[in-house]
Image (spheres, grey):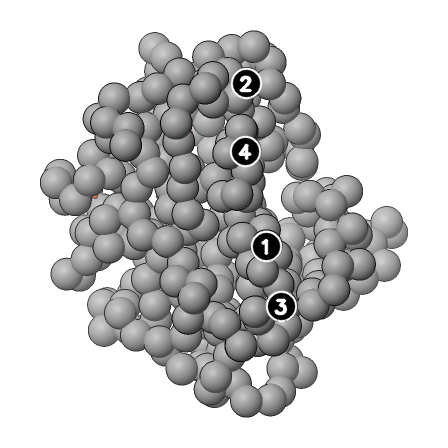
């Protein structure tokens, strides 16, 4: 087990441009023993700048490398975007709890992502695909602001050919290059029918998207225990000690970042 306070060095081996503001960083672990489960996050250090929490977007089964799909928003992410292949970063973790995928067996699973929120969900998707026969069907419903803002543009058409998977996408604002659906991601849930009480919904994206996706799933009859939400709160220690990430009685870094709707529903505006 790595010391959670002590970052270990990793090397950037590839940088993939996803959108004008999102890149996927492929990191070599330099032989360090590291593993994580889908849903857990790490703290990524940019030497001399600082650190920030990110959830790996690669498969937890891939033990040789770690991928992070990251949106440029501020100090740490801007510094990261200025780096080149070969640069050294630090990783500490993993932190938080995983998606309890054993509870998803035999069920239909709706993976609902908004924008860069598809990144942590890609890690879950890959984990589920390792034993795809255990699940009734895996649905991905993904929304982005425009067609330029879609991540994994080369991969999604390939995933659509995989057995047991059903993928639909929408963009908020259409353009000439987009032939698919136009509207917020929840429009992709409008025709969801079936034994919804027994289905699983996993949601990650901007707070407003998480809120309306949750409302939609509840309207459709999903059980609050079966709606899994990735909560993003400001974090510092990552270890349940500093209180930065407190949400009601939960520390998001330790009790989350994945919390069910049942856990957060009594917190005043849990999506703030
Ligand atoms: C558990 C967890 C997992 C995460 N996983 C990912 C991930 O896989 N990919 C990813 O891109 N991000 C992820 N994030 C968000 C990421 O941690 C932040 O974007 C990062 O900390 C921003 O650091 P910064 O120094 O660049 O920005 P700061 O300088 O801290 O912030 C600059 C400005 O950007 C705003 N800002 C901060 N975070 C965000 C955000 N997420 N979206 C929009 N505006 C923001 C701030 O309010 C501030 O105004 C995750 C966060 C958590 C808690
Ligand atoms: S980040 Fe310190 S308690 Fe969660």
Q: Position of residue 108 (x, y in %)?
A: 57, 76
Q: Secondary structure at mark 2?
A: strand
Q: Position of residue 18 (x, y in %)?
A: 67, 36
Structural distance between the alpha carbons of marks 3 and 2? 34 Å
* Among the 4 quarters of the image, the one containing residue 242: top left
* Among the 4 quarters of the image, the one containing residue 89: top left
Q: Position of residue 174 (x, y in %)?
A: 77, 56
Camera-side mark, 3 or 4: 3
Q: Secondary structure at mark 3?
A: helix
Residue 78 shows in the view: no
Closer to the camera, 192 or 178?
192
Which residue in the structure is indicated by mark 2?
Answer: 12
Q: Is residue 269 left or right of residue 150?
A: left
Q: Is residue 52 left or right of residue 88?
A: left
Q: Is residue 7 left or right of residue 54?
A: left
Quadrant position of the N terminus in the picture: top left
Marks 4 and 2, the one that precedes in the sequence: 2
Q: Position of residue 25 (x, y in %)?
A: 57, 27
96 versus 209 height, above or below: above
Structural distance between the alpha carbons of marks 2 and 1? 26 Å
């Amino acid at each position: 087990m790595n010391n959670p306070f002590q970052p270990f060095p990793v090397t950037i081996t590839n940088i993939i441009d996803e959108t004008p503001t999102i890149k996927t960083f492929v990191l070599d672990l330099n032989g360090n023993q590291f593993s994580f489960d889908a849903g857990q996050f790490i703290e990524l250090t940019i030497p001399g700048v600082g650190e920030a929490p990110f959830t790996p977007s690669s498969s937890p089964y891939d033990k040789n490398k770690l991928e992070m799909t990251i949106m440029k928003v501020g100090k740490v992410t801007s510094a990261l975007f200025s780096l080149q292949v070969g640069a050294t970063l630090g990783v500490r973790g993993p932190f938080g709890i995983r998606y309890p995928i054993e509870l998803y067996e035999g069920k239909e699973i709706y993976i609902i992502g908004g924008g860069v929120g598809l990144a942590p969900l890609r890690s879950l998707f890959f984990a589920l695909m390792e034993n795809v026969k255990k699940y009734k069907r895996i649905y991905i419903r993904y929304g982005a602001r425009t067609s330029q803002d879609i991540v994994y543009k080369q991969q999604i058409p390939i995933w659509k050919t995989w057995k047991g998977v059903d993928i639909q996408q929408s963009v908020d604002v259409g353009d000439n290059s987009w032939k698919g659906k136009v509207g917020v991601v929840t429009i992709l849930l409008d025709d969801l029918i079936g034994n919804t009480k027994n289905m699983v919904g996993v949601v990650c994206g901007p707070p407003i998207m998480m809120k309306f996706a949750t409302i939609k799933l509840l309207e459709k009859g999903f059980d609050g225990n079966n709606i899994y939400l990735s909560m993003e709160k400001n974090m510092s220690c990552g270890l349940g000690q500093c209180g930065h990430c407190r949400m009601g009685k939960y520390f998001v870094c330790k009790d989350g970042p994945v919390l069910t709707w049942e856990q957060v529903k009594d917190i005043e505006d849990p999506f703030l």
